[in-house]
Image: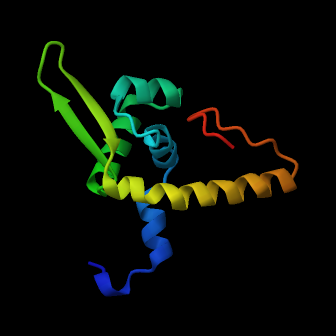
Amino acid sequence: MTDKNTVCPLKYLANTFGGKWKLPIICILADMSPKRYSAIKRRLGNITGIMLSQSLKELEAAGLVSRKQYNEVPPHVEYSLTERGKGAIPMLTAAAQWAVNEMKNDGFSPNCTECQAQV
């Protein structure tokens, strides 16, 4: 077990937001309206159901995403950012702006097709 007093902040950041799908999921939820599982999956396109479920569970365990289950007919689940998740948006926006500037310097045309972020 790692001593909580000796964790590198950048490693913590990478563990919290790392992986191929966590940031795009947060990007989709950043408009602050709850989203159903199927809507998230549709926006991400080529993610498998297992990977989406796993990523959502990890984001929920990290306290960034909340899951609300509606026990009605038909039953459904909605996901949204928690206050902690919303608190990460300014940092992620700044990181995305840095990436946009660097991409343009390197001759790329920034365009987020997965979550349709405004760049």
Residue farthest to the top, as pictured: 73
Q: Nearer the viewer, residue 21 or 78?
A: 78
**What is the quadrant of residue 34 in the picture?**
top left
Number of marks present in the image shown? 0
**Quick check: 38 above or below 15?**
above
Residue 40: x and y in percent read 43, 30
Q: Nearer the viewer, residue 52 or 40?
A: 40
- Is residue 85 left or right of 74 when viewed as pictured? right
In this view of the protein, which residue sits in the foreground, 11 or 77?
77
Task: Give the residue at x 70% y 60%.
Answer: 98
**Rendered residue at 21%/36% (across/down):** 68
Name above or below for residue 13 compared with residue 71: below
Tell me where residue 88 appears, x and y as whole percent. 45, 59
Residue 56 relative to residue 70: left or right: right
Q: Tell which residue pokes out farthest to the left in this image.
A: 71
Q: Residue at x 71, y 38 (%)?
A: 111
Q: Can you say which quadrant of the picture contains the N terminus?
A: bottom left
Q: Residue at 46% across / 39% down in the picture?
A: 31
**At which x and y percent is residue 15?**
43, 63
Q: Position of residue 29 (x, y in %)?
A: 43, 40
User: Taking 26 as reference, is 110 left or right?
Assistant: right
Q: Classify the position of the C terminus by image quarter.
A: top right
